Image (tube, grey):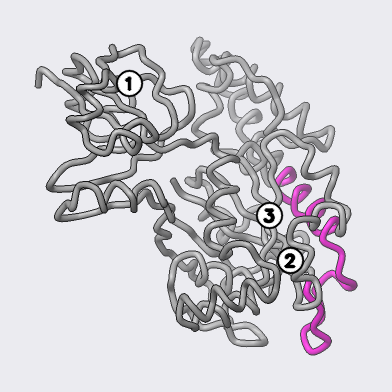
Amino acid sequence: MKIGLFGFPQVGKTTLFNLLTGAHVETPRFGSGRTDPNLGIARVPDARLDRLTAMFHPKKSTPATFEYVDIVGLQKGDAKGSLSLAVLKPMDALAHVVRAFPDEAIPHSEGALDPARDVETMEMELILADLDSAQRRIERLKVSLPKTNRPEEKKELAALEKARAQLEAGHTLRGVDFSAEDERALRGFAFYSAKPLLVVVNLGENDIAHFGSAVERFGLQQAAARPGVAVAAASGKIEEEMAALSEEDAASFRRDLGITEPALRRIIHSSYELLGLISFYTVGEDECRAWPIRRGIAAARAAGTIHSDLEKGFIRAEVVSYQDLVSCGTMQAAKEKGQLRLEGKEYVVADGDIMHIRSGI
Protein backbone atom coordinates (compact mmCIF):
# COMPACT_ATOMS: atom_id res chain seq x y z
CA MET A 1 0.00 0.00 0.00
CA LYS A 2 1.23 3.49 -0.88
CA ILE A 3 0.43 6.64 1.08
CA GLY A 4 1.37 10.17 0.03
CA LEU A 5 2.20 12.86 2.60
CA PHE A 6 1.31 16.43 1.66
CA GLY A 7 0.44 19.76 3.23
CA PHE A 8 1.54 23.36 3.56
CA PRO A 9 5.27 24.13 3.92
CA GLN A 10 6.92 23.73 7.33
CA VAL A 11 4.17 21.64 8.91
CA GLY A 12 6.39 18.68 9.88
CA LYS A 13 5.75 16.33 6.95
CA THR A 14 9.34 15.20 6.59
CA THR A 15 9.76 14.74 10.35
CA LEU A 16 6.72 12.46 10.29
CA PHE A 17 8.11 10.70 7.22
CA ASN A 18 11.34 10.00 9.14
CA LEU A 19 9.40 8.68 12.14
CA LEU A 20 7.33 6.34 9.98
CA THR A 21 10.10 5.00 7.74
CA GLY A 22 13.18 5.22 9.95
CA ALA A 23 14.77 7.48 7.32
CA HIS A 24 17.13 10.31 8.23
CA VAL A 25 16.14 12.96 5.73
CA GLU A 26 17.39 16.37 6.83
CA THR A 27 14.70 18.75 8.06
CA PRO A 28 16.27 22.25 7.98
CA ARG A 29 14.41 24.66 10.20
CA PHE A 30 13.66 27.07 7.38
CA GLY A 31 13.17 24.60 4.53
CA SER A 32 15.56 22.68 2.31
CA GLY A 33 14.67 24.03 -1.11
CA ARG A 34 14.24 20.45 -2.37
CA THR A 35 11.91 19.59 -5.22
CA ASP A 36 12.18 15.79 -5.36
CA PRO A 37 9.90 13.63 -3.19
CA ASN A 38 11.24 11.47 -0.36
CA LEU A 39 10.48 7.76 -0.66
CA GLY A 40 10.55 5.23 2.18
CA ILE A 41 9.12 2.00 3.57
CA ALA A 42 7.44 1.57 6.95
CA ARG A 43 7.36 -1.85 8.57
CA VAL A 44 3.98 -2.43 10.22
CA PRO A 45 4.37 -3.22 13.93
CA ASP A 46 2.54 -6.49 14.54
CA ALA A 47 2.41 -8.23 17.91
CA ARG A 48 0.68 -11.25 16.36
CA LEU A 49 3.50 -11.76 13.87
CA ASP A 50 6.00 -11.45 16.71
CA ARG A 51 4.18 -14.20 18.63
CA LEU A 52 4.00 -16.46 15.56
CA THR A 53 7.70 -15.93 14.92
CA ALA A 54 8.46 -16.98 18.50
CA MET A 55 6.33 -20.11 18.01
CA PHE A 56 7.74 -21.28 14.67
CA HIS A 57 11.34 -19.97 14.80
CA PRO A 58 11.46 -19.32 11.04
CA LYS A 59 14.54 -18.31 9.08
CA LYS A 60 12.79 -15.05 8.23
CA SER A 61 9.96 -12.95 9.62
CA THR A 62 8.34 -10.51 7.18
CA PRO A 63 5.87 -7.87 8.36
CA ALA A 64 3.41 -6.00 6.20
CA THR A 65 4.74 -2.72 4.87
CA PHE A 66 3.53 0.68 3.72
CA GLU A 67 5.33 2.80 1.15
CA TYR A 68 5.34 6.50 2.00
CA VAL A 69 6.00 9.39 -0.37
CA ASP A 70 6.72 12.83 1.09
CA ILE A 71 6.32 15.71 -1.37
CA VAL A 72 7.38 19.34 -0.98
CA GLY A 73 5.02 21.74 0.75
CA LEU A 74 2.17 23.19 -1.29
CA GLN A 75 0.99 26.78 -1.19
CA LYS A 76 -2.63 27.80 -1.66
CA GLY A 77 -3.30 27.81 -5.40
CA ASP A 78 -0.46 25.39 -6.20
CA ALA A 79 -2.39 22.15 -6.65
CA LYS A 80 -3.79 22.75 -10.14
CA GLY A 81 -1.17 21.43 -12.54
CA SER A 82 1.36 20.84 -9.75
CA LEU A 83 4.11 18.41 -10.72
CA SER A 84 4.77 17.74 -7.04
CA LEU A 85 1.15 16.80 -6.38
CA ALA A 86 1.10 14.63 -9.50
CA VAL A 87 3.55 12.31 -7.74
CA LEU A 88 0.61 11.29 -5.52
CA LYS A 89 -1.56 10.03 -8.38
CA PRO A 90 -0.54 6.35 -7.87
CA MET A 91 -1.12 6.48 -4.10
CA ASP A 92 -3.74 4.30 -2.41
CA ALA A 93 -4.40 7.04 0.14
CA LEU A 94 -3.27 10.53 1.08
CA ALA A 95 -2.08 11.85 4.44
CA HIS A 96 -2.51 15.59 4.98
CA VAL A 97 -0.18 16.79 7.73
CA VAL A 98 -1.62 19.91 9.40
CA ARG A 99 0.30 22.12 11.76
CA ALA A 100 -0.94 22.70 15.29
CA PHE A 101 2.42 23.50 16.90
CA PRO A 102 3.43 27.14 17.54
CA ASP A 103 6.80 28.44 16.42
CA GLU A 104 7.26 32.21 16.21
CA ALA A 105 10.44 31.80 14.17
CA ILE A 106 8.55 29.95 11.40
CA PRO A 107 5.27 31.68 10.56
CA HIS A 108 2.55 29.60 8.96
CA SER A 109 2.14 30.42 5.27
CA GLU A 110 -1.58 31.00 5.83
CA GLY A 111 -1.24 33.17 8.93
CA ALA A 112 -2.57 32.07 12.33
CA LEU A 113 -2.56 28.39 13.26
CA ASP A 114 -5.90 26.88 12.27
CA PRO A 115 -5.90 23.13 11.44
CA ALA A 116 -9.58 23.14 10.44
CA ARG A 117 -8.97 25.96 7.95
CA ASP A 118 -5.94 24.16 6.54
CA VAL A 119 -7.91 20.95 6.01
CA GLU A 120 -10.67 22.80 4.16
CA THR A 121 -8.16 24.77 2.08
CA MET A 122 -6.30 21.68 0.92
CA GLU A 123 -9.52 19.80 0.27
CA MET A 124 -10.54 22.60 -2.08
CA GLU A 125 -7.11 22.47 -3.73
CA LEU A 126 -7.64 18.77 -4.48
CA ILE A 127 -11.16 19.45 -5.75
CA LEU A 128 -9.93 22.16 -8.11
CA ALA A 129 -7.11 19.97 -9.41
CA ASP A 130 -9.59 17.15 -10.09
CA LEU A 131 -12.07 19.53 -11.69
CA ASP A 132 -9.39 20.78 -14.06
CA SER A 133 -8.53 17.20 -15.11
CA ALA A 134 -12.18 16.26 -15.57
CA GLN A 135 -13.02 19.36 -17.60
CA ARG A 136 -10.07 18.95 -19.95
CA ARG A 137 -10.98 15.32 -20.65
CA ILE A 138 -14.67 16.16 -21.13
CA GLU A 139 -13.76 18.79 -23.70
CA ARG A 140 -11.62 16.31 -25.64
CA LEU A 141 -14.34 13.66 -25.54
CA LYS A 142 -16.94 16.07 -26.85
CA VAL A 143 -14.71 16.74 -29.84
CA SER A 144 -13.87 13.09 -30.54
CA LEU A 145 -17.21 11.37 -29.82
CA PRO A 146 -19.11 12.68 -32.87
CA LYS A 147 -16.36 11.19 -35.02
CA THR A 148 -15.73 7.89 -33.21
CA ASN A 149 -19.08 7.12 -31.51
CA ARG A 150 -17.25 4.64 -29.27
CA PRO A 151 -19.45 3.12 -26.53
CA GLU A 152 -16.61 3.14 -23.98
CA GLU A 153 -16.06 6.85 -24.55
CA LYS A 154 -19.78 7.52 -24.04
CA LYS A 155 -19.61 5.71 -20.70
CA GLU A 156 -16.49 7.64 -19.75
CA LEU A 157 -18.14 10.96 -20.61
CA ALA A 158 -21.23 10.13 -18.55
CA ALA A 159 -19.09 9.19 -15.55
CA LEU A 160 -16.98 12.34 -15.90
CA GLU A 161 -20.10 14.50 -16.06
CA LYS A 162 -21.24 13.00 -12.73
CA ALA A 163 -17.82 13.65 -11.23
CA ARG A 164 -17.71 17.21 -12.56
CA ALA A 165 -21.11 18.03 -11.06
CA GLN A 166 -19.86 16.97 -7.61
CA LEU A 167 -16.60 18.87 -7.96
CA GLU A 168 -18.29 22.04 -9.21
CA ALA A 169 -20.50 21.89 -6.12
CA GLY A 170 -17.35 21.91 -4.00
CA HIS A 171 -17.61 18.26 -2.94
CA THR A 172 -14.87 15.66 -2.95
CA LEU A 173 -15.38 12.38 -4.80
CA ARG A 174 -14.76 10.14 -1.77
CA GLY A 175 -18.37 9.98 -0.72
CA VAL A 176 -19.90 9.64 -4.19
CA ASP A 177 -21.68 6.34 -4.76
CA PHE A 178 -20.49 5.68 -8.31
CA SER A 179 -21.69 2.55 -10.08
CA ALA A 180 -19.18 -0.20 -10.80
CA GLU A 181 -19.27 0.87 -14.46
CA ASP A 182 -18.55 4.49 -13.55
CA GLU A 183 -15.69 3.45 -11.29
CA ARG A 184 -14.11 1.48 -14.11
CA ALA A 185 -14.40 4.46 -16.43
CA LEU A 186 -12.85 6.83 -13.89
CA ARG A 187 -10.13 4.56 -12.50
CA GLY A 188 -7.41 5.82 -14.81
CA PHE A 189 -7.84 9.42 -13.63
CA ALA A 190 -6.78 8.58 -10.05
CA PHE A 191 -8.61 11.65 -8.77
CA TYR A 192 -7.03 13.09 -5.62
CA SER A 193 -10.33 13.84 -3.89
CA ALA A 194 -11.49 10.26 -4.40
CA LYS A 195 -8.60 8.82 -2.38
CA PRO A 196 -9.03 7.99 1.32
CA LEU A 197 -7.62 10.83 3.42
CA LEU A 198 -5.82 10.64 6.76
CA VAL A 199 -5.50 14.01 8.48
CA VAL A 200 -2.46 13.99 10.78
CA VAL A 201 -2.51 16.81 13.33
CA ASN A 202 1.07 17.69 14.29
CA LEU A 203 0.82 18.86 17.88
CA GLY A 204 3.06 21.13 19.93
CA GLU A 205 4.64 20.20 23.26
CA ASN A 206 1.82 21.76 25.29
CA ASP A 207 -0.80 19.66 23.51
CA ILE A 208 0.81 16.26 24.12
CA ALA A 209 -1.89 15.40 26.64
CA HIS A 210 -4.59 15.96 24.02
CA PHE A 211 -3.75 13.17 21.56
CA GLY A 212 -7.13 11.58 22.08
CA SER A 213 -9.14 14.81 21.77
CA ALA A 214 -7.40 16.46 18.80
CA VAL A 215 -10.59 16.35 16.70
CA GLU A 216 -12.60 18.36 19.22
CA ARG A 217 -9.72 20.59 20.33
CA PHE A 218 -9.00 21.81 16.79
CA GLY A 219 -12.52 21.86 15.40
CA LEU A 220 -12.09 18.91 13.05
CA GLN A 221 -15.44 17.24 13.75
CA GLN A 222 -16.81 18.09 10.31
CA ALA A 223 -13.77 16.70 8.53
CA ALA A 224 -13.68 13.54 10.67
CA ALA A 225 -17.36 12.82 9.93
CA ARG A 226 -16.87 12.70 6.16
CA PRO A 227 -16.72 9.34 4.39
CA GLY A 228 -13.22 8.16 3.61
CA VAL A 229 -11.59 10.53 6.11
CA ALA A 230 -9.84 9.74 9.40
CA VAL A 231 -7.97 11.95 11.86
CA ALA A 232 -4.89 11.03 13.88
CA ALA A 233 -2.52 13.05 16.06
CA ALA A 234 1.25 13.07 16.44
CA SER A 235 3.91 15.35 17.86
CA GLY A 236 6.78 15.22 15.42
CA LYS A 237 9.28 17.19 17.48
CA ILE A 238 8.77 15.25 20.72
CA GLU A 239 8.50 11.86 19.06
CA GLU A 240 11.61 12.52 16.99
CA GLU A 241 13.48 13.03 20.27
CA MET A 242 12.04 9.80 21.67
CA ALA A 243 13.04 7.88 18.54
CA ALA A 244 16.68 8.59 19.39
CA LEU A 245 16.33 6.97 22.84
CA SER A 246 16.59 3.34 23.83
CA GLU A 247 13.24 1.52 23.80
CA GLU A 248 13.22 1.42 27.61
CA ASP A 249 13.90 5.15 27.95
CA ALA A 250 11.42 5.99 25.17
CA ALA A 251 8.71 3.92 26.88
CA SER A 252 9.39 5.73 30.15
CA PHE A 253 9.27 9.09 28.37
CA ARG A 254 5.94 8.19 26.76
CA ARG A 255 4.49 7.16 30.12
CA ASP A 256 5.53 10.47 31.65
CA LEU A 257 3.85 12.36 28.81
CA GLY A 258 0.75 10.18 28.78
CA ILE A 259 1.43 8.84 25.25
CA THR A 260 0.14 5.29 25.02
CA GLU A 261 2.05 4.21 21.89
CA PRO A 262 4.60 5.54 19.35
CA ALA A 263 3.51 7.64 16.37
CA LEU A 264 4.29 4.77 14.00
CA ARG A 265 1.73 2.50 15.63
CA ARG A 266 -0.95 5.20 15.81
CA ILE A 267 -0.55 6.29 12.20
CA ILE A 268 -0.35 2.73 10.86
CA HIS A 269 -3.41 1.70 12.88
CA SER A 270 -5.36 4.67 11.53
CA SER A 271 -4.17 3.88 7.99
CA TYR A 272 -5.30 0.25 8.29
CA GLU A 273 -8.76 1.30 9.43
CA LEU A 274 -9.05 4.02 6.79
CA LEU A 275 -8.13 1.64 3.96
CA GLY A 276 -10.29 -1.18 5.31
CA LEU A 277 -7.30 -3.49 5.70
CA ILE A 278 -6.84 -6.68 7.69
CA SER A 279 -3.88 -9.06 7.91
CA PHE A 280 -3.69 -12.79 7.36
CA TYR A 281 -0.57 -14.87 7.94
CA THR A 282 1.46 -17.68 6.47
CA VAL A 283 3.76 -19.58 8.82
CA GLY A 284 6.46 -22.22 8.62
CA GLU A 285 10.11 -22.99 9.16
CA ASP A 286 11.26 -20.81 6.27
CA GLU A 287 9.16 -17.73 6.91
CA CYS A 288 6.38 -16.22 8.98
CA ARG A 289 4.73 -13.40 7.07
CA ALA A 290 1.87 -10.92 7.39
CA TRP A 291 -0.20 -10.19 4.29
CA PRO A 292 -2.40 -7.06 4.23
CA ILE A 293 -5.63 -7.35 2.22
CA ARG A 294 -8.88 -5.43 1.95
CA ARG A 295 -11.57 -6.57 4.38
CA GLY A 296 -14.13 -8.85 2.74
CA ILE A 297 -11.78 -10.51 0.23
CA ALA A 298 -12.35 -14.21 -0.50
CA ALA A 299 -9.69 -16.87 0.05
CA ALA A 300 -8.77 -17.41 -3.61
CA ARG A 301 -8.16 -13.71 -4.18
CA ALA A 302 -6.21 -13.48 -0.92
CA ALA A 303 -4.04 -16.34 -2.18
CA GLY A 304 -3.26 -14.19 -5.19
CA THR A 305 -1.53 -11.64 -2.97
CA ILE A 306 1.03 -14.35 -2.20
CA HIS A 307 1.42 -15.43 -5.82
CA SER A 308 -0.86 -15.22 -8.85
CA ASP A 309 -0.42 -18.97 -9.48
CA LEU A 310 -1.95 -19.74 -6.09
CA GLU A 311 -5.12 -17.90 -7.08
CA LYS A 312 -5.30 -19.53 -10.51
CA GLY A 313 -4.79 -23.03 -9.15
CA PHE A 314 -6.62 -22.55 -5.83
CA ILE A 315 -8.13 -25.76 -4.46
CA ARG A 316 -8.58 -25.27 -0.71
CA ALA A 317 -7.16 -23.26 2.16
CA GLU A 318 -6.21 -24.75 5.50
CA VAL A 319 -7.27 -22.09 8.01
CA VAL A 320 -6.87 -21.57 11.73
CA SER A 321 -7.50 -18.32 13.56
CA TYR A 322 -4.63 -16.67 15.39
CA GLN A 323 -6.38 -16.92 18.76
CA ASP A 324 -7.17 -20.63 18.29
CA LEU A 325 -3.57 -21.41 17.32
CA VAL A 326 -2.16 -19.51 20.28
CA SER A 327 -4.65 -21.22 22.62
CA CYS A 328 -3.73 -24.68 21.27
CA GLY A 329 0.00 -23.98 21.32
CA THR A 330 0.98 -25.82 18.12
CA MET A 331 -0.46 -26.39 14.66
CA GLN A 332 -0.70 -30.13 15.39
CA ALA A 333 -2.68 -29.49 18.56
CA ALA A 334 -4.99 -27.13 16.68
CA LYS A 335 -5.61 -29.88 14.12
CA GLU A 336 -6.30 -32.50 16.79
CA LYS A 337 -8.79 -30.16 18.49
CA GLY A 338 -10.62 -29.50 15.23
CA GLN A 339 -9.55 -25.84 15.02
CA LEU A 340 -7.74 -26.30 11.68
CA ARG A 341 -10.36 -26.37 8.96
CA LEU A 342 -10.61 -26.53 5.17
CA GLU A 343 -12.20 -23.59 3.38
CA GLY A 344 -13.14 -23.08 -0.28
CA LYS A 345 -12.36 -20.21 -2.61
CA GLU A 346 -15.42 -18.18 -1.58
CA TYR A 347 -14.49 -18.18 2.11
CA VAL A 348 -14.13 -14.59 3.32
CA VAL A 349 -10.79 -14.22 5.05
CA ALA A 350 -10.97 -12.92 8.63
CA ASP A 351 -8.44 -10.69 10.35
CA GLY A 352 -5.78 -12.86 11.96
CA ASP A 353 -6.43 -15.98 9.89
CA ILE A 354 -3.41 -18.20 9.39
CA MET A 355 -3.65 -19.93 6.02
CA HIS A 356 -1.92 -22.62 4.04
CA ILE A 357 -3.03 -22.60 0.42
CA ARG A 358 -3.52 -25.83 -1.51
CA SER A 359 -3.05 -25.17 -5.19
CA GLY A 360 -3.06 -27.31 -8.35
CA ILE A 361 -0.31 -25.24 -9.97
In the picture, measured across the screen, residue 212 lies left or right of residue 306, that is right
Residue shown at the point (21%, 28%) measured from the top left: 356
Residue corresponding to mark 1 = 299
Q: Between tags 2 and 1, which lies in front?
A: 1
Residue corresponding to mark 3 = 232
Magenta-colored stretch includes residue 117: yes
* Mark 2 crowd level (few <14, some 14–19, many ≥20, 10 Å Cα): some
Q: As shown in the figure, which amino acid type bears the numbered disc 2?
A: Gln
> Which of the marked residues, 3 or 1, is nearer the chain's N terminus?
3
Residue 111 appears in which quarter of the rendering? Answer: bottom right
Residue shown at the point (75%, 54%) measured from the top left: 122
* Mark 1 crowd level (few <14, some 14–19, many ≥20, 10 Å Cα): many
Q: What element carries label 2?
A: loop
Compare residues 14 and 354 and report the one nearer the observer. 354
Q: How many labels does the image show?
A: 3
Residue 96 appears in which quarter of the rendering? Answer: bottom right
- The CA distance from mark 3 to mark 1 is 32 Å
Q: As shown in the figure, which amino acid type bears the numbered disc 1?
A: Ala
- For the record, the magenta segment spans 101-128
Residue corresponding to mark 2 = 75
> Which of the marked residues, 2 or 1, is nearer the chain's N terminus?
2
- The CA distance from mark 2 to mark 1 is 45 Å
From the top left corner, tell me how far across and down residue 264 is, in percent: 53, 61
Tag 2–tag 1 contact (CB < 8 Å): no
Q: Between tags 2 and 3, which lies in front?
A: 3
> Which of the marked residues, 2 or 3, is nearer the chain's N terminus?
2
Q: As shown in the figure, which amino acid type bears the numbered disc 3?
A: Ala
